[in-house]
Amino acid sequence: MQRICLFPGTFDPVTLGHTDIIDRALPLFDKLYVGLGRNSSKLPMFSEEQRLAWLKEIYKDEPKIGVLAYDGLTVECCKQVGADFILRGIRYVNDFEYEKAIADMNRSLKNNVETIFLTTLPKYTSIASTLIRDVILNKGDVSQFLPDAVKKTIY
């Protein structure tokens, strides 16, 4: 049986924190889908097409990674791609509390889906897409926090 995982998020924009989690999770799974969740309560700074293009560019040479966008519940996307695992990155303790509540709900909805938490490396704990967007809006330089594929289109 293949170990298939979904890493859901908005990736607005994709950061080195995201790629750190993805890269370190790769050895754990046979297939890892990066799922761009469409969230009606969030207004993204970057288009869905742009965010998908960044992810596809970053992982174009990694056959174990698939990139997709989805609507609705994450567990329904898991069912569609055959994933039994959800990957989440944890920066701080309050991230864990929030993510555990979501993991518990997901397990209640689909009991064979397990959430795997990876903590970010210390050098990436301060990277949050919300902060990155704020700095970009205020004309600051966030290039040190972004993969090359993202930097090329922003700067």
Image (cartoon, grey):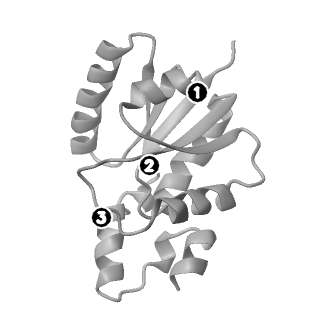
96 w.r.t. 133: above or below:
above
Q: CA distance from mark 2 to mark 1?
A: 26 Å
Residue drawn at (68%, 61%), measured in percent from left and top?
Answer: 57
Amino acid at pointer 1:
Val
- The label number, if any, that marks residue 130 in the structure image: 3
Question: Label 1: few (<14), some or many (≥20) within 10 Å?
Answer: some
Marks 2 and 1: which is nearer the front? 1
63 on left or right of 66? right
First in residue order: circle 1 vs circle 3: 1
- The label number, if any, that marks residue 120 in the structure image: 2
| Residue 119 visible from this viewpoint | no
Farthest residue, direction bottom: 139
Residue drawn at (32%, 15%), measured in percent from left and top?
Answer: 109
Q: Secondary structure at mark 1?
A: helix
Pick whichever, 12 or 146, lies toward us: 12
Q: Secondary structure at mark 2?
A: loop
Residue drawn at (38%, 63%), measured in percent from left and top?
Answer: 127
Marks 2 and 3: which is nearer the front? 3
18 on left or right of 33? left
145 w.r.t. 139: above or below:
above
Amino acid at pointer 2:
Thr
Q: Which quarter of the figure has residue 43? A: bottom left
Pick whichever, 98 or 33, lies toward us: 33
Q: CA distance from mark 2 to mark 3?
A: 17 Å
- Tell me residue 154's x, y (percent): 51, 80
First in residue order: circle 2 vs circle 3: 2
Name the residue tied to disc 1. 81
Q: Mark 1 and mark 2 in contact (Cβ < 8 Å)? A: no
Amino acid at pointer 3:
Thr
Residue drawn at (57%, 78%), measured in percent from left and top?
Answer: 153
